[in-house]
Amino acid sequence: MSPRAAWRLETLRFSRVYDYEAGKQNWLASGLPTEGQYADVPRAGTVARRDVPTARIDERLSEVRARLQASDHDTAVVVNEEGVVLGILRPEQLESGAERRVEDAMMGGPSTFRPHIFITEMAEFMERHDLPSAPITTGDGVLVGLLRREDAIRAAEEAHRHDH
């Protein structure tokens, strides 16, 4: 952002002004805080569950199932050392042999979504495509959380009630 633009935002009473060289779209896609008219609208990144179990490609399915049983999740997201999403393990993949490796059982390259997408859009998309959950990632593919369809629908309905 140019110094002139930063000064202008400050005169408009924006409380925090940043020089973020990667640009506005990257800022939004990273789920970083925003101000303005839509700042309080629920988004995929604010509704996604951060406590989602993760798995590594070299693990056995039995290890991942044990972690899932200790949680309230039925899905694990497969990530690398940097937290970049590589795949997803839904219940049907987890049932395919305890000693199978995650890499052999996972659904590779799942569709991922950015944190800044309005929750109403996500809920509609997830319903239309019968998607039980969706990984929410930064623009670099790093896992932010897992958005469950029922959470998205509940948040979208709540947002709709507040609008009317």
Image (tube, helix red, strand yellow):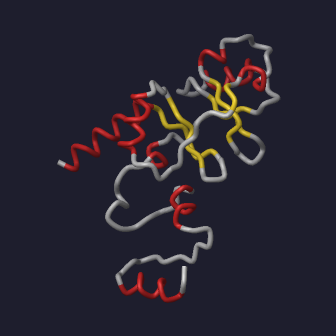
**Residue at (57, 61) in percent of width and height:** 26
Q: Residue 39: x and y, percent?
A: 37, 61
Quarter assignment of residue 56? top right
- Decide if residue 115 is on the left or right side of residue 98: left
Quarter assignment of residue 122? top left
Quarter assignment of residue 20? bottom right
| Residue 51 in view here | no
Q: Residue 102: x and y, percent?
A: 75, 24
Q: Residue 116: x and y, percent?
A: 47, 53
- Decide if residue 61 is on the left or right side of residue 23: right
| Residue 88 in view here | yes
Pick the front one: 136 or 63: 136
The number of numbered badges drawn on the structure is 0
**Residue at (46, 76) in percent of width and height:** 16
**Residue at (58, 36) in percent of width and height:** 111
Note whether 74 is above or below 38 in the view shown. Answer: above
Note whether 94 is above or below 35 in the view shown. Answer: above
Q: Residue 159: x and y, percent?
A: 29, 46
Pick the front one: 17 or 114: 114
Note whether 141 is above or below 51 in the view shown. Answer: below
- Decide if residue 69 is on the left or right side of residue 36: right
Q: Residue extending furthest right?
A: 58
**Residue at (37, 35) in percent of width and height:** 124
Quarter of the figure with the N terminus: bottom right
